[in-house]
Amino acid sequence: MRIPSNKIKDIVKFFKEELQDLYDEREVKSFVNLVMQEFTGLDYTQLLMSDDKTVSESVMLKIKFAINDLKVYKPVQYILGKTIFYDLGFIVNPSVLIPRPETEELVHWIISDYKNNLNFIDIIDIGTGSGCIPVALKSNLELSKVFAIDISKDALKVAELNALKNQMDIQFRLLDIFETEKWSQLPMFDIVVSNPPYVCESEKEQMQANVLEYEPHLALFVDNDNPLIYYNIIADFAREKLKPSGCLYFEINESLAYETIELLEAKGFFKSEIRKDMQGKNRFIKSVY
């Protein structure tokens, strides 16, 4: 189908009609606002007041392409190439996971714990992806030196761009956390944080198409037979690289919260605390070593 005209009101009407059977009304409204603002420069209020305003053919084409992408469940963040995380702008593409609101809660927990700290702190984020965690931490904890590692060269390129975009000095390293012989290349840390892959293969059928078809599976899924594989190795890393009374922070699979606590306590961690996310699910753990 073609958009009836290049008037804002016709474009918005077409946009909503094309997506109404695929998404709920709230999502469609959000997509319309995000896409229209990106390509026309008009926010929601301005759109309402610009019914008869027209846009160029090139802008119409960009909007039509975005609608087509949304119809095959491509995430709007990948369509626009950007997102917001902890009030900061981030570049995203299919090389990295789209930062989630839950991860903002993890970042907020760390910031709250250290915002009144008067000493320099060393932080490392393991499996950094887009770099959202280290950039947000560095932005809010000025007395910090932040490292971030990832196994993916493509992800690190995005993370480095995001650090540059937000003018944050982050030390990025290409490193597979399972290569234990390379841990010695890194300094000691006050904080180890990670949002590692934690979705079991058996949980795939519960996930939405936009996640399954577009986001990197390497950053999402773990084998059913060893779902805590990343927590185990990162805990070993933390035992070796945390300073005295250093803290380990994890985002976790809600169904494996207590198994994760048992794993940590067996390795000598203590004062373990589970926190729920905004949905009331067990989502985060903090442990001291």
Image (cartoon, grey):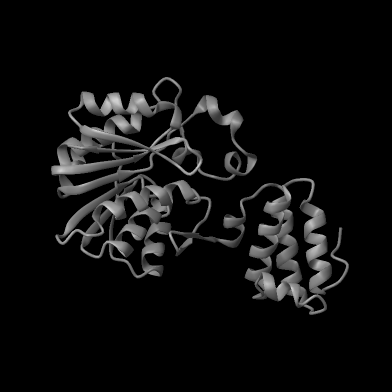
User: Relative to residue 218, is residue 30 depicted above or below?
Assistant: below
Q: Quadrant of residue 60?
A: bottom right
Residue 143 or 180: which is nearer the viewer?
Answer: 143
**x and y percent of residue 150 in the render?**
34, 47
**x and y percent of residue 104 in the render?**
42, 52
166 on left or right of 115: right
Q: Is residue 155 visible?
A: yes
User: Relative to residue 231, is residue 29 depicted above or below?
Assistant: below
Q: Quadrant of residue 86?
A: bottom left
63 on left or right of 79: right
232 on left or right of 95: left
Q: Residue at x 66, y 58 (%)?
A: 30
Q: Quadrant of residue 240?
A: top left
Q: Residue at x 82, y 70 (%)?
A: 9
Image quadrant occupied by the N terminus: bottom right
**x and y percent of residue 73 in the render?**
67, 47
Which residue is most to the left? 244
